[in-house]
Image (spheres, rainbow, N blue to C red):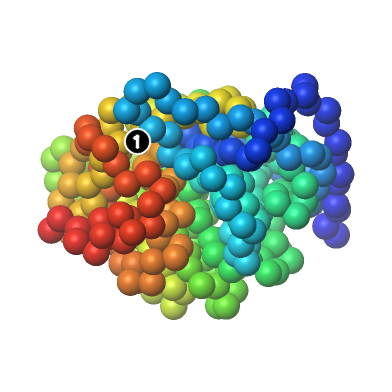
Amino acid sequence: MATKLSFTFQFPPEKSSKSFQRNPNHCDGFGFSKKSSGFRGQLSLKVNALQGEVTQSTNSETTLLSPTFLPSSSKLVLVVGGTGGVGQLVVAALLKRNIKSRLLLRDPEKAVSLFGNQDEEKLQIFKGDTRNPADLDSSMFEGVTHVICCTGTTAFPSKRWDGDNTPERVDWEGVRNLISALPSSLKRVVLVSSVGVTKFNELPWSIMNLFGVLKYKKKGEDFLRESGLPFTIIRAGRLTDGPYTSYDLNTLLQATAGQRRAVVIGQGDKLVGEVSRLVVAEACIQALDIEFTEGKIYEINSVEGEGPGTDPEKWQQLFKTPQA
């Protein structure tokens, strides 16, 4: 039986302002999710939405988010892995855009520390573990229109592997279980993967793949491609800017990509380089609405220069003319 939990938390008062601002931040190398039991429950976070002033930068550096409050969206986006680095940024950006979000998390309480208290109309939390098919109850997907999956673990053995949190279990079995449970009515599934997945037997990728992370990410990609669901796959370069996995929403809203705001998008698994987690998060959100990205796989890097920010037209052009 699914149990619905309600939590109320009081935060220090914020400055009132004309607009409500949200801004993102990142994930660990290949992302991660925290351990939790197989119990399924929905956590309702009913609180006043955070309000804050939109601050203008005194130099040319810009944040990922624009200082505008957008009208509510008809989307309901399920974010899986929303407390990892890229996932946090995805959730923060969706909140800023006033897009209704649903999170599937092993540790629901962590969402409160990261995103504050949000009205259930803006943010819903379900407890579940993609490694356990029994956790993926169909009720979790009711009304969901889009999915962004940012799950992952470290490439090499670390404390984050505790509790069977290995690449095989997370990047392959977890992704397979999730995709198998998703309804066919979805408009798009965006999966965050990694550059080098098609070359895991070649140097230098074979070093990164010593414990199978690239191989298992590729298996997850292939399962999504063969599922019949409308998909877009974003293969990220080495992730930078963070991790900020223990920061709260106020920190996320102030995140910037420094001088590396320009974006390079490629296809064919040819790109080698780094990418800001901010850029990966924004690419995932933009891909939801760009029709021609359906059924496509893209690699993404960050370089120095002015970037597309949140401008849909600039992102469309980037996705339209990827480097081969």
Quadrant (top left/top right/bottom left/bottom right) for the C terminus:
bottom left
271 vs 220: above or below = above
258 vs 236: above or below = above
Q: Residue at x 40, y 60 (%)?
A: 287
Residue 80: percent from the left, percent from the top?
A: 56, 51
Is the residue marked by circle 1 packed among few (<14), some (14-19), or many (20+) residues within 10 Å? many
119 vs 14: above or below = below
In the figure, residue 72 lies in which quadrant?
bottom right
Left or right, 159 with reference to 225: right
Residue 157: percent from the left, percent from the top?
A: 41, 30
Q: Residue at x 70, y 51 (%)?
A: 122
Q: Residue at x 75, y 55 (%)?
A: 121
Disc 1 secondary structure class:
strand
- In this view, the residue in front, 304 or 16, is 16
Left or right, 175 with reference to 61: right
Confirm whether residue 105 shows in the render: yes
Quadrant (top left/top right/bottom left/bottom right) for the N terminus:
bottom right
Residue 17: percent from the left, percent from the top?
A: 67, 33
In the figure, residue 10 lies in which quadrant?
top right
- In this view, the residue in front, 87 or 168, is 87
Residue projecting furthest to the front = 18
- In this view, the residue in front, 301 or 159, is 301
Q: Residue at x 48, y 48 (%)?
A: 150
Confirm whether residue 168 shows in the render: no
- In this view, the residue in front, 228 or 208, is 228
Numbered marks: total: 1
67 vs 146: above or below = above
Q: Which residue is mark 1?
A: 276
Residue 307: percent from the left, percent from the top?
A: 29, 41
Amino acid type at circle 1 is: Ser
